Image (tube, helix red, strand yellow):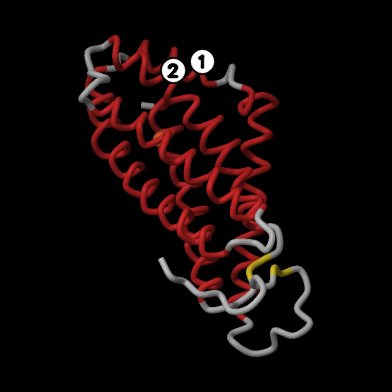
Amino acid sequence: MQSLQILKDEHEVIIRVLDLLERSVDLLQHNEPIPRGFRRWVVEFSREFADRCHHGKEEDLLFPLLESRGIPREMGPIGCMLKEHITGRECVNKMEDAIAARPRDNVAFATAALQFVALLREHIFKENNVLFEMASHCLSAEDDAQLVQQYTALQCEHNGGSQKRRFRDELDQWEAEFARTEGFGTEGHEGRKGQEQPGSGSFLFTT
Ligand SMILES: [Fe+2]
């Protein structure tokens, strides 16, 4: 079904960001610099793409329709997904606070980031393999067409999905940037431009 495939395609983009976020924590744990601005971009991506654009489709359009087709919210898969969306927002808020702290709180950032990565990976797996499977059996062809039509009314889909395209283009660039960063190995840090340096002192990953 196209309405579900669009969401699965967005999951793929989110998973690529989670992979980079996990790699950024690994770099921090080894006192290695990470590409400058990446952490702020992750917060923006999580709010605008993952939450407003993607979860917006689910929470405002797909889930209510599934409820009306008999899939329960309370004590059911929809309620579980909604709770995990809230937990994800809390993780993003914690990452943002850690970035804003002076000095920057790398331990708090890493803790929230790893919680976010684990949560969303599992969440996406459950949606793809459980909830969307159920949805594919209870939605009609008309429901599917209606959802696709409703998706296009969302702001992130305006102008041919230009906002989504921007995030995907930026993700391509971050992946290339990470590949360059990691290609440096452990030598030659001095004078690297365009990379965030670890916070003052050693990064001690304690939690
Ligand atoms: Fe989703």
In what element is the residue under mark 2? helix
Q: Are marks 2 and 1 in contact (CB under 8 Å)?
A: yes
Q: In which quarter of the image is residue 38?
A: bottom right
Q: How far apart are marks 2 and 1 (CA)?
A: 8 Å
User: Nearer the viewer's eye, disc 2 or disc 1?
Assistant: 2
Q: Tell me which amino acid carries mark 2.
A: Leu
Residue 13: image location, x then y, percent:
50, 46
Q: Quadrant of residue 32?
A: bottom right
Residue 109: image location, x then y, percent:
54, 58
In what element is the residue under mark 1? helix
Q: In this view, does 185 lie to the left or right of 83?
A: right
Residue 204: image location, x then y, percent:
50, 75
Of the numbered discs in the image, which one, if any, rests on residue 150? 1
Tag 1 or tag 2, which sits nearer the N-term?
A: 2
Q: Which residue is drawn at 36% across and 37% down?
A: 84
Q: Residue at x 47, y 59 (%)?
A: 19
Of the four image quadrants, the one with ligand 1 is top left
Q: Residue at x 41, y 27 (%)?
A: 2
Of the pair 62 and 152, the residue shown nearer to us: 62
Q: Mark 2 points at which residue?
A: 61
- Examine the rendered structure and indicate whether residue 89 appears above or below residue 40: above
Of the pair 40 and 207, the residue shown nearer to us: 207
Q: Tell me which amino acid carries mark 1.
A: Gln
Q: In this view, does 104 lie to the left or right of 150?
A: right
Q: Residue at x 28, y 24 (%)?
A: 135
> How dense is the environment of label 2, judged by Cα within 10 Å: few (below 14), some, or many (20 and up)?
some
- Examine the rendered structure and indicate whether residue 74 appears above or below residue 46: above
- Examine the rendered structure and indicate whether residue 141 appears above or below residue 192: above
Quarter containing the N terminus = top left
